[in-house]
Image (spheres, rainbow, N blue to C red):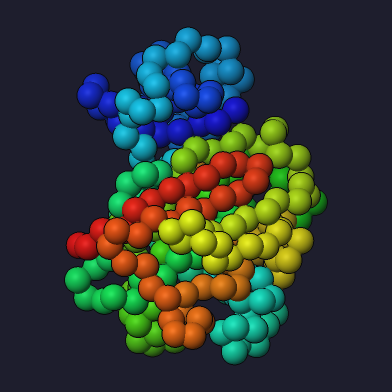
């Protein structure tokens, strides 16, 4: 099942995407589950599956981030070996974690905004894991039961601001720089340890390409590590790292600019597409 958050003339809602049709779950189940995060946290997925009537075409909705207001967006840096090598850094013994904030995200087909403060806007193709239930100190063997689903993520980075200090927060959190979508594919459709392939294309040219087999820290390890120091909650998002090929490490550097189109594709999920606009 593909679950998305969107806006229509009637306001923000969420629902099931099936081909070019959208079923508005908010209109039917909203009193019980006001948003997608609530549907996940209150175990409403089985109830949602029973709703099948199409209400909109995908062309009639405005896509929002899959989870517009996650309590936490925890991102893993340097999690593919080729990306570690291209940055000239050493491998870390534990996952390198940084945080994004909700306002740094945009939905599918919405513009990623290059801020006035920089022209060094870079792309990063990543797999997002959406947490389905609360947990603390989760073991790797139990980790898969805490996954609600998967989505595409573009961890858009303002590189010069990222490098101002050894902390990356500023460069990762300019408003509307990260793409998240189009939808969440529920975990029952992607069994544990499924090999997934992710790619980034800029104006149709492939920039990044890798599989989850190349991850240094796999999804169970990320869940175990993060849940050791914070309680993971339904709707929290774990962004699991990017492969090599980022624009900053090319010669000359390749930055996203207004008018560009960037696509993040995960073979088991779909394609997240964003244009680039000036802020």
- Which residue occupies the foreground of this view, 46 or 155? 155
Count of residue discs: 0
In screen coordinates, is 152 left or right of 135? left
Measuring from the top left, give residue 59's x and y in whole percent. Answer: 36, 28
- Which residue occupies the foreground of this view, 113 or 35? 113
Q: Is residue 17 above or below residue 179?
A: above
**Residue at image x 34%, y 53%?**
275
- Which residue occupies the foreground of this view, 25 or 206? 206
Which quadrant would the C terminus be assigned to in this image? bottom left
Which quadrant would the N terminus be assigned to in this image? top right
Measuring from the top left, give residue 233's x and y in whole percent. Answer: 52, 46
**Residue at image x 71%, y 58%?**
212
**Residue at image x 32%, y 34%?**
62
Measuring from the top left, give residue 171's x and y in whole percent. Answer: 36, 74
**Residue at image x 61%, y 68%?**
243
Measuring from the top left, give residue 93's x and y in whole percent. Answer: 70, 79
- Which residue occupies the foreground of this view, 98 or 265? 265
The answer to whether residue 276 of the structure is visible from this angle is: yes
Q: Is residue 52 above or below residue 88?
A: above
């Amino acid at each position: 099942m593909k679950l998305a958050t969107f806006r229509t003339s009637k306001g923000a809602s969420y629902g099931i995407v099936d081909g070019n049709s959208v079923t508005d779950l908010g209109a039917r189940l909203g009193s019980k589950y006001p948003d997608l995060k609530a549907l996940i946290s209150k175990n409403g997925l089985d109830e949602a599956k029973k709703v099948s009537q199409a209400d909109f075409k995908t062309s009639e909705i405005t896509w929002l981030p899959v989870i517009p207001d996650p309590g936490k967006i925890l991102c893993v840096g340097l999690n593919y070996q080729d990306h570690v090598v291209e940055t000239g850094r050493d491998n870390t013994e534990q996952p390198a974690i940084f945080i994004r904030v909700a306002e740094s995200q945009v939905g599918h087909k919405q513009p990623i905004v290059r801020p006035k403060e920089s022209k060094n806007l870079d792309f990063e193709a990543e797999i997002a894991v959406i947490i389905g239930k609360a947990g603390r100190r989760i073991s790797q063997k139990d980790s898969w039961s805490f996954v609600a689903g998967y989505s595409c993520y573009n961890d858009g980075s303002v590189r010069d601001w990222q490098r101002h200090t050894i902390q990356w927060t500023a460069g990762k959190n300019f408003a509307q720089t990260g793409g998240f979508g189009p939808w969440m594919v529920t975990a029952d459709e992607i069994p544990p340890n499924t090999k997934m392939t992710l790619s980034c294309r800029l104006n149709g040219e492939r920039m990044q390409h890798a599989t989850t087999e190349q991850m240094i820290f796999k999804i169970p390890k990320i869940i175990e590590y993060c849940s050791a120091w914070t309680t993971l909650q339904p709707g929290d998002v774990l962004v699991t790292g990017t492969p090599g090929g980022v624009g900053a490490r090319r010669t000359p550097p390749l930055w996203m600019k207004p008018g560009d189109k960037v696509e993040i594709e995960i073979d088991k999920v779909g394609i997240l597409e964003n244009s680039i606009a000036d802020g």
